[in-house]
Amino acid sequence: MTTPSVPAAAAPAIDAKAAVGWMHTARFLTTAAQLHQLPVIDVPEIAFVGRSNAGKSTCINTLTQQRQLAFASKKPGRTQHINLFALGRQGEMDAVLADLPGYGYAAVSRSDKLRWQRVMLNYLVQRESLTAIVLLCDPRLGLTELDEALLDALRPRVEQGLKFLVLLTKADKLTRAEQAKALSITQLQAGGGEVRMFSALKRQGVDEVAQLLWEWSHPEQPQQDPDGPATPAAEDTQEKPA
Ligand SMILES: Nc1nc2c(ncn2[C@@H]2O[C@H](COP(=O)(O)OP(=O)(O)OP(=O)(O)O)[C@@H](O)[C@H]2O)c(=O)[nH]1
Ligand SMILES: [Mg+2]
């Protein structure tokens, strides 16, 4: 007789194709250098954070299948503002992605570093619409002191329900064995957050991340009908003004 020792993972609430289609609706919303310049929004906001050059902007472009939605570059420090992107079908906004400047870039002056640290800390601690964080990390570096400091700063919000995913980027640079090792080490460090591998180059992890972000943005929605998550019928369940 076989008794499974590990419970089966819950089936995703949305199929991969519908989740990826939802990500593809992303469009530029606004850009801001400071927290108070950001619009107040009433839908879940998911921030992409991490060291400079970790691959945040590239990840957003890959997930949304848009080549230049977020500015990506070989040169670290490319993203210098908080850039918001709206998600949602038929012009309706049901979630927002935030691309943040990276930290840990050595060539930035000390005063710029301090200024940005303050902006980011304020954003992470105070932004009301923030419901989830995707912390991008190059697995060849692992979670660094700065990443740990960010996770520490977020701890009180995580205890209040903020979700977080550590995304190990550039998986194409690692062998399968190295990927497995990086995943298990990071899972130990991530203290309750989700951990996944991702490669923009190979499109590895795209479906899973899209599904997770959709679920996080629609916690109230029951299991989607696999035949029609993107159909008007599914969207009719949302409240609309008369
Ligand atoms: N091989 C490989 N390279 C990647 C991947 N993702 C990003 N890169 C490269 O990493 C570099 C940095 O990518 P960005 O997306 O600009 O990184 P960022 O985290 O937004 O950087 P900042 O805006 O400076 O914070 C670019 O040269 C990308 O092409 C990946 O999955 N595989
Ligand atoms: Mg960037």
Image (cartoon, helix red, strand yellow):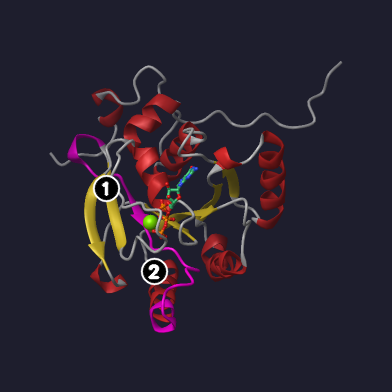
Q: Nearer the viewer, residue 181 or 207?
A: 181
Locate residue 82: give its quadrant.
bottom left
Number of residues whose C-alpha sits closer than 10 Å to that of mark 1, classed few (under 14), some (14–19) or many (20 or more): many
Residue drawn at 31 percent across, 65 percent down: 81
Residue drawn at 44 percent across, 82 percent down: 110
Q: Amino acid at mark 2?
A: Tyr
Is 146 drawn above or below residue 79 in the view shown?
Answer: below
Residue 59 position in % (x across, y down):
42, 45
Residue 118 position in % (x across, y down):
41, 78
Is 13 drawn above or below residue 218 in the view shown?
Answer: above
Mark 1, ligand 2, within 8 Å: the answer is no
Residue 52 position in % (x across, y down):
46, 61
What range is drawn magenta here?
89-113
Q: Which mark is residue 123?
A: 2
Say if residue 35 shows up in the picture. yes
Is 96 drawn above or below residue 228 in the view shown?
Answer: below
